[in-house]
Image: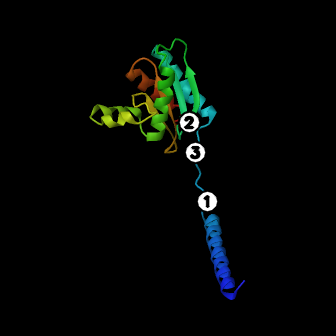
Amino acid sequence: MTAADSLAFGSVALLATLAFGLVEADAVEGQLPQKKVLTLEAARRVVAAAEAEAQRNNAPGVIAVVDDAGWLILLVRMDKAPMLASIELAPGKARSAAIYRKPTQVLEEAINKGRTAAVTAPGFVQMQGGLPLMADGAIVGAIGVSADTPVHDQQIAEAGARALAP
């Protein structure tokens, strides 16, 4: 190894040491943010409240709860759910509400007001009945409901979402 090689190697080693020191200092000074997550037990409470609302309205259907990334946690198909398509629609509504971070009714209204290109978004169901689930001001997941009418879907989803309210 020549003197120039030694100097270059030493400079790289010094820079690496400094960089490591900066990263280590940042790790010590700052903590990773804490994130609320939707547990299976919380998802069960959401579904139970939504199911009770569906029974009160004589509107059996499919209720889906997903985490904040849109991944399914719980799916319930109530007895006598009238539409076979609901098994796909409910989780799609929940996923859309979670990923778009807004009620699917807002997405449907945008399409109805002329934002027709939105219907090309693959894998999303932009129909009323999907709501983000909130905990301490943060979205922790979403609920999607497909029962009989858009109004009932929304009403049932709202009942489920209220189950997380303090």
- Which residue occupies the foreground of this view, 4 or 37? 4
Report which quarter residue 20 is drawn in.
bottom right
Cα–Cα gap, marks 3 and 1? 15 Å
Q: Is 166 left or right of 126, judged from the image as shown?
A: right
Cα–Cα gap, marks 2 and 3? 15 Å
Classify 141 as above or below 23: above
Question: In the rendered structure, which disc, 2 or 3, sits on the residue that comes first in sequence?
Answer: 3
Q: Which amino acid, by three-letter code, is at mark 3? A: Lys
Query: What residue does disc 2 label?
Result: 71
Q: Position of residue 112 (x, y in %)?
A: 29, 31
Query: What residue does disc 3 label?
Result: 36
| Tag 2–tag 3 contact (CB < 8 Å) | no
Cα–Cα gap, marks 2 and 1? 26 Å
Q: Residue at x 55, y 26 (%)?
A: 47
Q: Is 44 left or right of 145, judged from the image as shown?
A: right
* Secondary structure type for disc 3: loop
Q: Residue at x 72, y 83 (%)?
A: 1
Question: In the rendered structure, which disc, 2 or 1, sits on the residue that comes first in sequence?
Answer: 1
